């Protein structure tokens, strides 16, 4: 064992002990974060407008600060972007993470000197947690790759801005820089396909041990590696044993990845966003990701089924239940307040608090009152694929409300790697799995309001072509698993 491996194990034990100090006191930890946030922001414009000086309890906060999304907070954010100080948080941000807005162009998410360190620490601690639990640390001696956006930053009114992954590239610790790939020059390539080709050339003969990125884009990298080497990725990189991912559920990709790699590898799931780093998988044995309660973020939770009512109840960490679908709200040391990022979560453990991402509050199908969410379609596909050699590259689901004939249905657009022998039987398996999970959907099938699932096959690389058509190929961009309209569906139907 190398000195580097030994040092990693010692550091992993130290970090594990630190995490336990707050993970075992969740309510007290969140109360302290809450008090600190209110105190530090009470003299900001937002703090004055919402009477932070007289907020003593969470109930006070909930009464004075309404739930907002980006558009509803925009009047404040625009002032920050213009260069004004002490608007949402004290002083000015040190960066803006630029993301794609769905309604009005780019969004500018502030990153402050208080919030930025937590993005870095959380990613590091996820790896250290893995080392502590498994005792595996040899991978620190090899090369690591993080498929991410370009680190080239723009500037707006004296504040640097770029994709979060590109900003984070500027904070890679010195002890990792020699191990890290690709090169700075390759990382700066803007065109995703050109970039992946360059990464393949650069990494092909290296001792790659850790690979990280959004599964759909890592899949493209793996496919190009396999084409170049004419053998599985696991044979090209014999010491590759750890895959780190975030942004989407890995399960729909798992079978395809194991085929591309040629063997199983351990995986660590992360839950990062421009607005904060919320959770990471702290155990290979337990389901879910450890919710980071000590990272400058105060969490609130609203039951998804109540979210669009006039005055939904807002729950704190000590009040949540297992298995309930919650909309996640944030108040952060970057100046976001009761902020709805659009993600929904379910708790898999309350000791410690672990979550899974169940979907997006805007990404659902309820054309007939069925309330289908991302977790359900992903689980249904996984169940249908069990004990078969069917492999799926990508998929999305949309309602078909006005079919040419017969009853309406849910249309699944699937790009298969290995097709099922009988497509109708496979569709029926998906449908049966959906009905077991979602009683509303089952009632609609039983009541002859909907017919069973219909699968439409998508040509190879079809989803990549779709993402390219909307200017979102690669990087941190993710395909919605489902939608309540047919905007994506229409692309494939045409």
Image (cartoon, rainbow, N blue to C red):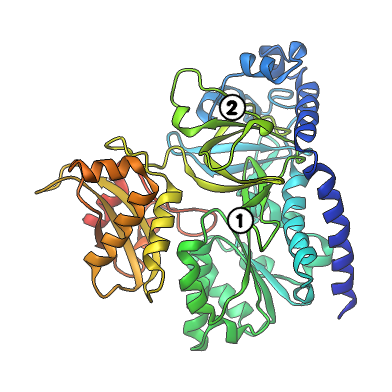
Question: How far across and down, in percent of the image, does residue 91 sit?
Answer: 77, 28
Residue 194 in view in this figure: no
Q: Nearer the viewer, mark 1 or mark 2?
A: 1
**Res. 78 mark:** 2
Instruction: Please give the residue where the numbered disc 1 appears in the rendered image.
Output: 287
Residue drawn at x 50%, y 72% is 257
Quadrant in the rendering for residue 473: bottom left
Between 84 and 447, the residue placed more toward the observer is: 447
Rendering coords of residue 10 (x, y %): 89, 65
Mark 1 element type: loop
Q: Nearer the viewer, residue 97 or 483?
A: 483
The answer to whether residue 334 is above or below residue 428 is above
Query: What is the number of callouts on the image?
Result: 2
Label annotation for residue 405: none
- Whole-percent x, y for residue 202 in the image: 62, 78
Please report the residue visible at 50 percent of the width from the left and 68 percent of the height from the top. Answer: 254
Compare residues 447 and 156 and report the one nearer the observer: 447
């Amino acid at each position: 064992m190398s000195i580097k491996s030994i040092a990693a194990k010692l550091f992993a034990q130290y970090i594990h002990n630190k995490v336990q100090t707050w993970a075992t006191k969740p309510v007290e930890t969140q109360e302290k974060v809450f008090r600190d946030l209110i105190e530090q922001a009470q003299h900001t414009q937002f703090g004055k407008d919402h009477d932070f000086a007289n907020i003593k309890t969470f109930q006070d906060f909930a009464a004075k600060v309404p739930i907002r999304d980006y558009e509803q907070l925009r009047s404040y954010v625009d002032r920050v972007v213009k260069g004004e100080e002490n608007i949402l948080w004290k002083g000015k941000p040190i960066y803006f993470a630029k993301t794609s807005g769905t309604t009005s162009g780019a969004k500018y998410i502030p990153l402050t000197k208080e919030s930025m360190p937590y993005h870095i620490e959380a990613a590091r601690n996820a790896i250290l947690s893995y080392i502590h639990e498994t005792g595996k640390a040899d991978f620190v001696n090899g090369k690591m790759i993080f498929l991410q956006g370009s680190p080239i930053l723009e500037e707006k009114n004296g504040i640097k801005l770029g994709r979060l992954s590109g900003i984070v590239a500027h904070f890679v610790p010195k002890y990792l820089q020699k191990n890290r790939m690709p090169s700075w020059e390759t990382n700066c390539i803007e065109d995703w396909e050109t970039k992946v080709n360059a990464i393949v050339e650069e990494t092909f003969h290296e001792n790659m041990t850790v690979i990280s990125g959004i599964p759909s884009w890592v899949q493209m990298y793996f496919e190009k590696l396999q084409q170049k080497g004419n053998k599985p990725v696991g044979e090209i990189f014999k010491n590759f044993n750890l895959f780190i991912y975030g942004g989407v559920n890995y399960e729909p990709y798992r079978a395809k990845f194991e085929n591309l790699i040629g063997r199983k590898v351990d995986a660590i799931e992360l839950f990062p966003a421009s607005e904060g780093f919320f959770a990471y998988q702290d155990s290979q044995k337990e389901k879910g990701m450890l919710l980071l309660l000590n990272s400058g973020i105060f969490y609130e939770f609203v039951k998804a089924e109540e979210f669009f009512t006039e005055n939904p109840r807002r729950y704190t960490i000590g009040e949540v239940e297992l298995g309930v679908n919650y909309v996640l709200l944030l108040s952060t040391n970057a100046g976001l307040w009761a902020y709805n990022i659009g993600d929904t979560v379910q708790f898999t453990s309350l000791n410690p608090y672990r979550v899974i991402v169940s979907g997006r509050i805007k990404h659902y199908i309820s054309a007939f009152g069925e309330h289908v969410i991302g977790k359900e379609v992903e689980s249904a596909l996984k169940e249908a694929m069990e004990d078969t050699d069917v492999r799926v590259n990508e998929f999305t689901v949309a309602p078909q409300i006005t079919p040419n004939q017969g009853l309406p249905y849910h249309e699944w657009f699937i790009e298969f790697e290995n097709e099922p022998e009988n497509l109708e039987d496979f569709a029926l398996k998906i449908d049966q799995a959906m009905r077991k999970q979602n009683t509303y959907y089952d009632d609609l099938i039983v009541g002859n309001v909907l017919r069973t699932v219909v699968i439409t096959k998508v040509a190879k690389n079809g989803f990549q072509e779709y993402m390219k058509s909307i200017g979102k190929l690669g990087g941190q961009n993710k395909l919605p698993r489902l939608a309540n309209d047919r905007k994506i569906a229409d692309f494939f139907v045409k």
